[in-house]
Amino acid sequence: MLLRIYIAESAKIGKKPAYRHLVEMFKKRGFPGCTVFRGMVGYGHEQVIHTVDVLNFSMDLPVVIDVVDTKERVMSIVDEVEELVEHGLVITHDVKMGRKQK
């Protein structure tokens, strides 16, 4: 199952950037991996477009955090993530995962 979190780059959890806090939390809880993507353009609940366009440069770009694990592991942490993410979107999605073994 995929756990995907959409937040602003400027979002904080405590004094730490939210994306950093979440990555560290997933690592501490033993999730196999986590990736943070920084968006080029996007908008959220305030309906303000944030972009890397040099004419309208923003320091508050959209950020997407992806974590993939079993359904049981992902669902065991969703409520906690939803509580931590004040202005953002937390979604889950069933995925088919394949791994090539060496």
Image (cartoon, helix red, strand yellow):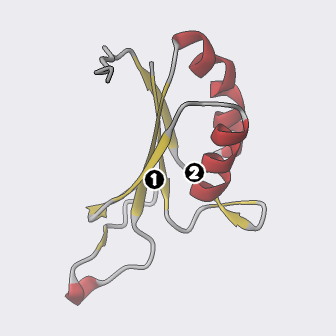
Residue wearing tag 2: 87
Residue 63 located left or right of residue 16: left
**Residue density around tag 2, few if under 14, some if 14–19, many if 20 or more, within 10 Å:** some
User: Which badge, 2 or 1, comes first in the chain's sequence?
Assistant: 1
Please state which amino acid type lies under the numbered disc 2: His
Asked if marks 2 and 1 touch (Cβ < 8 Å), the reply is: yes
> Which quadrant of the figure has residue 93?
top left
**Residue density around tag 1, few if under 14, some if 14–19, many if 20 or more, within 10 Å:** few
Quadrant where the N terminus sits is top left
CA gap between label 2 and label 1 equals: 7 Å
Residue 14 located left or right of residue 64: right
Residue, x 34% and y 17% (percent of image)? 95
Residue, x 65% and y 41% (percent of image)? 27
Q: Where is residue 53 in the image (x, y as percent from the top left)?
A: 21, 79
Q: Where is residue 71 in the image (x, y as percent from the top left)?
A: 53, 12
Foreground: 11 or 1? Answer: 1
Q: Disc count in the image?
A: 2
> Which quadrant of the figure has residue 57?
bottom left
Foreground: 27 or 47? Answer: 27
Circle 1 sits in a helix, a strand or a loop, which is it? loop
Quadrant where the C terminus sits is top left
Please state which amino acid type lies under the numbered disc 1: His
Q: Compared with residue 28, is residue 23 higher up or lower down, i.e. above or below?
A: below
Residue wearing tag 1: 45
> Which quadrant of the figure has residue 11?
bottom right
Q: Where is residue 17 in the image (x, y as percent from the top left)?
A: 63, 64
> Which residue of the protein is positioned furthest toward the front in this rendering?
102
Q: Compared with residue 9, is residue 67 higher up or lower down, i.e. above or below?
A: above
Q: Which of marks 2 and 1 is in front?
A: 2
Q: Where is residue 20 in the image (x, y as percent from the top left)?
A: 61, 58
